[in-house]
Amino acid sequence: MTPTESPVASITPAPRERVRVFDTTLRDGEQAPGFSMTRAQKLRIAQALAELGVDIVEAGFPQASDGDFASVQAIAREIRSATICALARCQRGDIETAARALEPAVRGRIHVFIATSPLHREHKLGMSREQVVAAAVAGVRRAKELCDDVEFSAEDAMRTEPDYLAEVFSAVVEAGATTLNVPDTVGYITPAEMFERIGFLRTHVRGIERAVLSVHCHDDLGMAVANSLAAVAAGARQVECTLTGIGERAGNAALEEVAMALKTRAELFGVDTGLRTPRLYPAARLLAQLTGQPIPRNKAVVGDNAFAHESGIHQHGMLKHRGTYEIMRPEDVGFARSQLVLGKHSGRHALRERLASLGHTPDEAALDQIFTRFKSLADKKREVFDSDLEALALGRDAEAQGPWRIVHLHAASHLGGSASASVRLQREDGVMASEAAIGDGPVDATLRAIGRAVGQDFELVDFQIRALSEGGDAQGQATLGVRHAGRELHGRGVSTDIVEAAALAALEIANRIERSKPDKAARAAANHA
Ligand code: KIV
Ligand code: ZN
C-alpha cells in the first residue's frame, strides 16, 4: 500500500436495511370526511404512489361497498409495480371478497385485522382473549389459502396487554402471517413507549424472524410521525402512512415526513426506503387537487412555505450557505420553486414539461385538449400559475365528464334583493333542459337551477371557494359537498368566474349521480338474455 492509499477508501459502505413504505391514503385516508374519491381519482392517486415508489398500496376495503370493490380491482389491474393490498376483517366473507378484488394484481396482499385491546374485546367485540386469538388465526389461515402475502393487524395494539399481544402475534405467524402490524389506532402512545414496545415484541413473539414488523400510527396527540420513527429505530421494517397525513380523525403518519426524516437523518436511522422522493410534492399536490382540500402552507416537506425564507437574517444566511437554514433541498422532494410559469406565448413543449414537474403526464390526445384550454385561459389571464395548470390537467378527469354539459348560464344579483339564475344544459343524447331559479345569492340560485334541470335533489352540506393563484384574474376553485340518497358526494369546478366554478362543481356531482343510475339499455339486454 502506498502512503497515499487510504485503507478506508476501498471499503464499500454496508447496504442499509430497507424499510417498506405501505401507503393507506386510499383506505384509511379516504375514510376521513372530506377526502372521499371516485374510482378514477383513486386510480390517479395509485399511479402517483407507484411513480413515487411505495412498496405497498392499500387500495381499499372491498367488503365495505361495491364501489370499494371496484376501485381495488381497478387498481390491482392497472398498477403493476407495487403490491396491492385489500383490507378485511377476520371473517370469511370479507377475506374471500378481498381475494376476488385482488385477482388481477401482479402481487396482492390480504390485510386482516381484529381488535385486541381489553376495551375493544369487551365493549366492541364481546369476545374473550381466547376467542380473539382463535378468530385471528382462522382469519389468517383463510387468507393464506387465497394469497401468499398476508398481513395481520392487531387493532388498538398499543392499548393491548404486551404479553397478550405477543401471544396473538405468535399465533398468527404460526398460521402464516408474513407482516405483523402494530397500530396505534387512537394515537395514544408516545415515542419512548413505542420504542420500548417494538423492542419487546421483537424479543417475545415466537417466529418473529419469519415476519416483517410494521407500525401504523394515528395523530390524535400529534405524535404519529415521531412514533413511526421511534418504531423504525427499534427495528420495525414497514411503516404505514398516508400522503399529507390524511386519515381518521386527526389523521395518520404523513408519508412525506416519515420519508424525509429517514432520508435526512439517514446516519441516525441507518435505513433506506425505496422512494423516489422528488415525486413527493407532485403526489401531495395531486391529492389536494383531487379532493379540493388544500395543503396547509406550513405543512412540513410539501407546504408552500416549507422552503420559503422570509426573515432578513435567514435570507442573508441562505445566500452565504444554503445549509444555514435548509436541511433538505427543495429538489429532493420535487418542490416546484417557481410559481409563475407560462403565458400566452408558451408552447406545447413547455406546457408538457411543466405538467410533468407537477406530476401530470397526459398522453398526446389529452395534452392537445389541455393545450387548447391553456391557450384560452392564457388569453383571459396574464399569468398562468402552477395551480392553474393543475386545474386544467385535472379538468379532463373522465369522472368529471358528461352526460350533461352547460350550454348557457346567466346569474344576476343586486344589493338587498334576491338573486336569480337561468341555465341551459345539454345531455350527450341531445336532450336539452332549461331552468331558472331564485336563491340566496347567485351561487345558490345557479345550484338550484342546475338541480331542477337535471331532476336531482341536492342538499348542500359543504361549499368552499378559494383562489388558486394571485391577482384579480385568479382562477377560483369551487368545492361542493351535497347529500343525495343518503350519500355525501363532492364536486369541484374551476373558472376565472366563481359562479361558473360553482356551476361546474354542481355539474360534476349531477353527472356522477346520472352515471351511477343503472343503465336502462343494459338492463333491457339482460332481461332478454
Ligand atoms: O388504525 C387502525 O387500527 C387501522 C387498522 C385496520 C390497521 O387502520
Ligand atoms: Zn388506521
Image (cartoon, grey):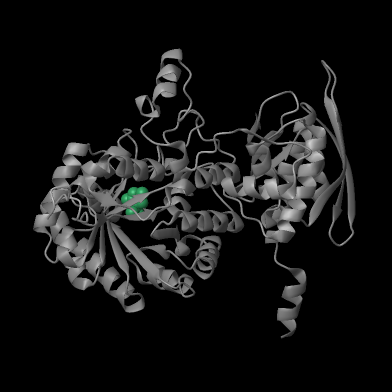
Quadrant assignment for the C terminus: bottom right
Q: Position of residue 53 (x, y in %)?
A: 43, 57
Q: Nearer the viewer, residue 229 or 10?
A: 10
Q: Determine whether, in the image, residue 336 is placed left or right of residue 252.
A: right
Residue at screen point 76% across, 33% down: 496
Q: Position of residue 260 (x, y in %)?
A: 36, 42
> Hey, which quadrant is residue 98 in on the image?
bottom left
Quadrant assignment for the N terminus: bottom left
Residue at screen point 67% across, 42% down: 389
For this orientation, the residue located farthest to the bottom is: 529
Residue at screen point 30% across, 44% down: 262
Q: Nearer the viewer, residue 54 or 516?
A: 54
Q: Determine whether, in the image, residue 2 is placed left or right of residue 43.
A: left
The image shows residue 468, relative to residue 288, as above or below, that is: above
> Hey, which quadrant is residue 27 in on the image?
bottom left
Q: Report whether residue 149 is seen.
A: yes
Q: Determine whether, in the image, residue 145 is placed left or right of residue 410.
A: left
Q: Position of residue 113 (x, y in %)?
A: 31, 60
